[in-house]
Image (tube, coloured by chain):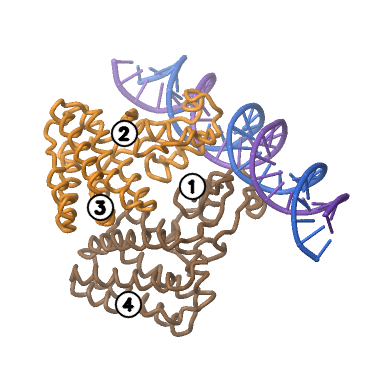
Chain colours: A orange, B brown, C purple, D blue
Amino acid sequence: MNMAQEFNHPQAEFRTTQERVYFQVRDAILRGKFLPGHAITIRGLAAELDCSPMPVREALRRLTSERALELSDTRRVTVPTMTPEKLNEICAARVALECQAAEHALPFVQEEDLQQLRDLDARVSAALEQRDIEQYVTANLDFHFTLYRLGRPHIILSLIESLWLQTAPLQHLVFQRFGVQELPDRHEDLLDAIAESNVERVRRAIRQDIEEGLGSISAEELL
Amino acid sequence: MNMAQEFNHPQAEFRTTQERVYFQVRDAILRGKFLPGHAITIRGLAAELDCSPMPVREALRRLTSERALELSDTRRVTVPTMTPEKLNEICAARVALECQAAEHALPFVQEEDLQQLRDLDARVSAALEQRDIEQYVTANLDFHFTLYRLGRPHIILSLIESLWLQTAPLQHLVFQRFGVQELPDRHEDLLDAIAESNVERVRRAIRQDIEEGLGSISAEELL
DNA sequence: AGCACTAAAATGTGATCACAAATTTTGGTA
DNA sequence: TACCAAAATTTGTGATCACATTTTAGTGCT
C-alpha cells in the first residue's frame, strides 16, 4: 500500500503538471525526504521532475501557503524549522480540530468501520513492536484520517492535513535519530470510546494521543 | 482606517508583484467585491492590476489553496458558492479554533487591551445602529482579530483568517440583500468574560457569537 | 591557516510566446 | 422566435527569456 494514501487523490491521474509536482513534493515531505532547514530550488526540482520551472513555481507557492514549506527573507523556499512556539500552536490546533472531526464522525461509525480502525491500529502496534518507522508513520496517519473521513469533512480535513504536513519533517528527523520505541499506543482507549460513542472520552483520548505524540518530539532538542 | 487592517501586513510595502496582487485580490474578496459564482480570469486581472499574467497566476493559486477561491472542473478560477455543509464545517472549525485562540490570548490581556476591545465594540454597535454594512464588517473583524492577536499566534491565526475569507462573499451578499438589522451584538458578554478571565464563559460567548452570526446567514437562502 | 573581498555561477521574479481546451459569438435552420 | 452547429475568440498551462539579486567560488592579504 502506498504511504500516506489518505493524502492522495485515489482515483485521479493528475490533470496538470503543476498538480503532479505538488503531490510529488508533498509526498516527499511526508516521507521525510526533506530535512528541516534544507533549501529547495525551483530549477533543481524542475530538472529532477523533468519539467520546466513554471509548474514547480506554482506547486511550491501552493505548499508555501499551506506552511508545508517556508519562504526565507531572501525569497528562497526552504523546509521549515520547528520552534517550541510553533509546535505548541500546532498541537493546540490539532487538538481543537481533530476532536471536532472525531466528534462529527462519531454518529457515522458503522461496525465495519470500527473493525477497519481496529485493523489499522493493529498495524500501528505491529510497527511499533518492530520499530518500523516507515510503517508506523503510515499506519498512524491512516488510522487517524480513516476515522476523521467518516464524517465526510472537507474543509476541516484539509486544515488537519496542513498541520500534519508541518510536523512531518521534524517527526522524521526525531524518529531517525531516536527511533519510535518510546511512543505509547493510545489508540485502544480511543477505540473503546468510539465503540461506546462516548464523545467526551473520544475527545480526551484524541487530546492525549496528540499531546503525547508531539510531546515526545518536543522533548528532544529542537536543534 | 483601512478596512480589514488586521489582515494586512502593517509595515511592509510588498516586495513582489505577486504579493501585491495577492493582498489586493484578498482585500477585494473581504470587501465583497466578488460575488459567489463569479469567474475570474488571469488576463483580466492582470490588465486591471497593470502587470503580466505571471504574478496573477501565482496569487490566484495561493488564494485557491486557501479556499478563498475555487478551481472549477475546467480549471477556471471562481468565487466559491456556499453550501449548508460547507457553512456548517466552517462554523465548527471557527468555534474550535477561535475558542482556542481566545483562551490562549486571555492571560495576555492588559487593561489597555481591554479598553481597545471596548472601543472596537463601540464601533461595531454604532455600525449596527446606523445599518452601515461596510463599517460593521470592518469593526467586527478588527474586534475579533485584535483579541486573538494578543496571544501572538501565527499558525492558528492564519487558519482562522482562511475561514473568514471563505464566508466573506456570502456574508456580503446576504448583508446587501437583507441588511444587518437582525444581528445581535454578543460582544458585551464576551467583554465581561474577558474582564474576569473566565475561560469557560469566553468560550461560550465566542461560540454563541459565531453560531448566531453564521446562522443569520444560513437562515437566508443559500442560492 | 583564517578572513575579507571580488568575480562567477545560480536563483527568483516577471514578461512573452505557443498551444490545446474551453467559452463565446455567429450564422443558418426549423 | 427558438435552437443548434461551427467559427472565432478567450482562457489556462507550460516553456523560454531577460534581469536584478543572491549565493557560491576563488583570490589575495594578514
Residue at 15 percent across and 51 percent down: it is: A193
Mark 1: amino acid: Arg
N-terminal of the pair, mark 1 or mark 4, is 1
Residue at 37 percent across and 62 percent down: it is: B88
Question: Dot 1: what SS?
Answer: helix
Q: Is residue A129 above or below residue A209?
A: above
How far apart marks 1 and 4 lie (CA) works out to: 34 Å
Mark 2: amino acid: Pro
Q: Are marks 1 and 4 on the same chain?
A: yes
Q: Residues within 10 Å of mark 4 (few under 14, many from 20)?
A: some
Q: Which residue is mark 2?
A: A36
Q: Which residue is mark 1?
A: B62
How far apart marks 1 and 3 lie (CA) works out to: 29 Å
How far apart marks 4 and 2 lie (CA) works out to: 44 Å
Question: Dot 2: what SS?
Answer: loop
Q: Nearer the viewer, mark 3 or mark 2?
A: 3
How far apart marks 3 and 2 lie (CA) works out to: 30 Å
Q: Which residue is mark 3?
A: A102
Q: Nearer the viewer, mark 4 or mark 3?
A: 3
Mark 4: amino acid: Arg
